Amino acid sequence: MSKVVLLGINSKFVHSTLAVWQLKAAVQQFAQKAHDVVVLECNINQPDEEIVAQVSACRPDVVGISTYIWNAGKLPGILRKLRKALPQAVFVMGGPEAAHNVDYWLENGANHVLKGAGEQTFPAFLDGREDGGDGCFVDPYTTEYLAALRGKIAYIETSRGCPFSCAFCLSGDSKVEFLPLDDAKAQIAKLAATDVRVIKFVDRTFNCDAKRAYEMIEFIMGLNTNNRFHFEVAADLFDQHTLNLLATAPAGLFQIEAGLQSFFKPTLEASMRKTNLDKAVANIKQLMQMGNIHIHLDLIAGLPHETLVDFAHSFNQTYAIGAHKVQLGFLKMLHGSALRRNEKSIIFNPEPPYEIISNPWLSRQDLQVLKRTENALQQTYNKGHFLQTLNYVQAATSLTPFEIFRTLGEFVQKDGMALNDYAEKLFGLFGSLKGVNLDGLRGYMIYDWLAMVKGSNMPLFMKLGDKKQMDRIRKNAEERLGRKLRRTEVAILPCGEGVFVDSASPDPVTGLYPIFRVG
């Protein structure tokens, strides 16, 4: 009997690796010989020596490692140390990073690289068989795996492949295979009975089959669960039947991520991106109007033909939709993607995650502008921070959203800065802009602070009024809520009006706390 370690290295502690558990289940189900399989999950923030020690302690004959862009940069060093610690072990690589870059991994410590569905190839490899078997879409959700999740983000795969052929993606233009619907429902139900906070579907386009997507959404809505379910969708593929169903979902049950990537037609064409943008925007706006679903929209900076000015237009159009998050990502030139294969004018980092450095349309300086803009966006809007303030500044100054975040990003980068200090910087910058009234700005920032922070002291510039006035407002608020309030839950606006927060009742979709006014 061979001793096998399946090693998954996540980008964060809160993440989990679905692949290694799928492989363990596949070995148990499809291998013709007995194998003792152990799953180890680590993360990229752990020292190499710690990971090597965990693997070595198992004394494996075979080490299988799942590779992705988030762990590919760390793995060569780990492989070198593992080979010294376990000179007799066989090292097998799989996953998208390995399958599309075989020679690299063979040169950096792997004995074998497996391609295709691991549920088929890995059990056959362990058995020493030539055939790949018939295994696919195993159920990985054993008691052991569910216990290992321990409140982390869980992942589920109910389809593989994608009907589209986006040039920056690995999944494009491949046959879509579906897990039988009854099996998918059974796996969903298992995860829904756990305490994981988010269950993310790794299906590349969850709603590519509208009827199937409707049935799964309807099934999830019938479960008694406190989990949130996250789907990646093509927003233009939603039919009205499905939108009507989503409108009846409990608030906070679903989180939808839709990739728009760009609004610039030449860029979409060069990226082989086929999207009906008008329909996508209309559908997303309808989802937003429902008020019960958390919506993420994705943009990619660095795609062909899109200049800084063009990207700013794409950003402003996306921001205007009003989604809860606008994720500004940067092009990664992935092994196996059509863009890496065909577009030789893009300069990118040769090390994972192969992020763009420049192209004929965006200089290095342009990319740095976008990096700073993304930092400002991430530290404010995407965290639900200072939302009313941002709306006020946009209305008062007539600046575009991109101009606001670009200005903020160039003025201050919040990397490790305390939120109080960041708020001070924000007030100083926005207060200097033409058209902004300082008392108005201060009032919106007070309002935002109460809505987004639970029980934290305000910066000094937000603290207005005297103790007597604060006591009166707090007493009034306590009578209305029927419970005691902390002093940090009450504030006075520049106009003299009082406000208080109900920190016991966060919005299930946004996570923000409701604010009430006291005369």
Image (cartoon, helix red, strand yellow):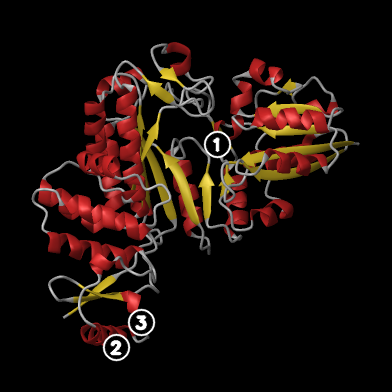
> Does label 3 or label 2 sit earlier along the sequence?
2
Q: Residue 74 has which mark?
A: none
Q: Nearer the viewer, mark 3 or mark 1?
A: 3
397 above or below 271? below
Residue placed under numbered mark 2 in the picture: 479
Q: Which mark is residue 485?
A: 3
For the residue pair 357 and 150, the one nearer the viewer reads as 357
What is the crowding at mark 1: few (fewer than 14 residues within 10 Å), some, or many (at least 20)?
Answer: many
Q: Is residue 135 visible in this depiction of the protein?
A: no
Instruction: Identify residue type, mark 1.
Output: Ser
Pair 3/2: label in front: 3
Residue that appears at 53% across and 40% down: 202
CA distance separating discs 3 and 2:
10 Å
Give how far across and how far down residue 179 sits, in percent: 59, 39
Q: Quadrant of the N terminus?
A: top right
Q: Residue 159 shows which numbered tag?
A: 1
Upstream in sequence: badge 3 or badge 1: 1
| Badge 1 or badge 2: first in the primary sequence | 1
| Residue 52 occupies quadrant | top right
The residues bearing labels 1 and 2 have C-alpha atoms spaced at a distance of 53 Å
Q: Nearer the viewer, residue 267 or 8?
A: 8
Badge 3 vs badge 2, beta-carbon distance below 8 Å: no
Q: Which residue corresponds to the image point at 65% horizontal and 25% vertical from the top-left?
A: 116
* 182 sits to left or right of 298: right
Circle 2: residue type:
Glu
